[in-house]
Image (cartoon, rainbow, N blue to C red):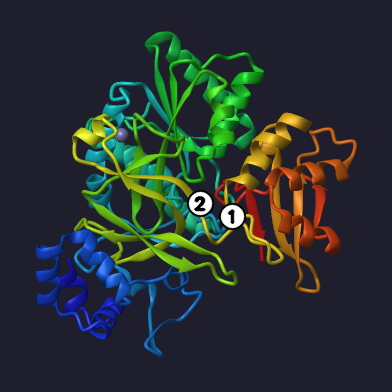
Amino acid sequence: MVRQNVFSNPNSPYLQLMQAAHCEMGDLEKMVASKGLEQTLLTLRREGVYISFEEYKGRKPLVRNGREIPIRAEDFRNRNLAGMLDAETGGSTGVGRPVGLHISHIAAQAPARMLAFEAHGLQSSPFAIWMGVLPDSSGPNNVLRSAKYGQVPKRWFAHVVTADSLKRRLKSRLYNRAIVVLGRLNGIPIPEPEPLPFDQALVVAEWMSEELKSFGQCVLRTQVSKGLRVALAAESAGVNLTGATFVLGGEPVTPGKVAAIRRTGAATVPMYSFSEHGTVGIGCANPVGEDEIHVFQDIIEVIQFPRKVLGHDIVVDAFNWTSLSPTAPNILLNVESDDYGVVEERACGCGLDSCGFRKHIRNVRSFQKLTGEGVTLIGSDAIRALEEILPARYGGSPLDYQLLEEEDNDGLTRVSLIIDPSVPIDNEQDVIETFVTATGNHALRQVWGPVNTLRIKRQKPILTSRGKMNPLHLLK
Ligand SMILES: [Zn+2]
């Protein structure tokens, strides 16, 4: 892949990075043979062969040794893949970006996914998804990936994407239709997507309940906050979901949300993906934390490397990703996602471990988010305060609390604690005190106290255009 997409591609940004590091194709081959892949990637990273998150997204120019290297999104595209479809991501920034979607890459992700379902005993479980339709690629990806090995979803609940032109809508509808029709022509009963608004989560809970009565188990693949909506709807309707499994991704799989879902009796399995590549891992069956996943090292590799968080003195061990599959839509060579966390190799003894997937990732956090007036809330304390401590004390669920960071008319950062109006609050100051104390962050009190930056807003938490709810929402 490097030979074809880097050394034979004069437009590849990596080519100039390799040249600056004095690394030729032959050097690379020797290094991989003698040191192995991971050490090679670390060596390259130290020598400047990497693309930071901001550089990849075009928010910062790519500068090495004082020289700017021009980059365009298309320069990362895999030159060996024809027939790529531009879908949109559910980007957590709230703005959908086009992302390459290729049928052979969906197929390449199927084997590891099948093994993961097997490791969790879910391979013959009735299965539904509640995810997007095109132009959001999340639904089609999940339908096709599992259909590849014969696990066809019984229902495809689709969230409705509104902000879309008529032309795009028509094109997307044709794509979605084609997936269903072509599947059926080939004997694969792919279901029609059923539009389902966010407040209709009980429909999904009732489907799960029916399947549990007949089969004793079922799987729902959805985003974290939608999974929680289903769980809350089940809880208030008195539906027990023991035997069900929520396969969750798209948003951080946090302890508070997982605990609220598990109260219904259901189990949860995390899934981790990012738009530039697709799925990179699924939950371990003997996990040490609710978000622990096995990295699918057959198609992607990850190393960690320290980097400063923009505008802060904090250094995090960011994930640097390298695509290994010839089907990868984008060539990634030490490309940062905006995440960091724990990467470790351990013998967990689950089915994925015995297949050779040794590398685990857990405690995944974004380093782009959770800043505010020079005070960093990075870490699990703020999320725990929002998702566990506040709901326990004042009522509501993790879906009722959110931090909103926005700039006021003077360009100053204002942070609001959004609380859904359905939660009764008598004393707002008391809530602020509880929140600040719960984050355990004294700097927060010092900075936010005097300038009165933190305030309470009574409104529904804000969702991204793809219906995701982030614990901290940035409006800039
Ligand atoms: Zn495992």
**133 horizontally vs 278: left or right:** right
Marks 2/1 in contact by CB < 8 Å: the verdict is yes
Which quadrant: the C terminus? bottom right
Q: Nearer the viewer, residue 209 or 228?
A: 228
Q: Residue at x 33, y 47 (%)?
A: 344
Q: Nearer the viewer, residue 266 or 451?
A: 451
Residue corresponding to mark 1: 378
Q: Earlier in the sequence, mark 2 or mark 1?
A: 2
Q: Quadrant of residue 21?
A: bottom left
Figure quadrant, ligand 1: top left
Residue corresponding to mark 2: 365
Seen from this angle, which residue lies furthest bottom?
66
State whether residue 306 is above or below residue 69. Answer: above
Give the x, y percent position of residue 18.
24, 79
Q: Secondary structure at mark 1?
A: loop
State whether residue 361 is above or below residue 373. Answer: above
Residue 196 shows in this picture: no
Which quadrant: the N terminus? bottom left
Residue 420, numbered circle = none
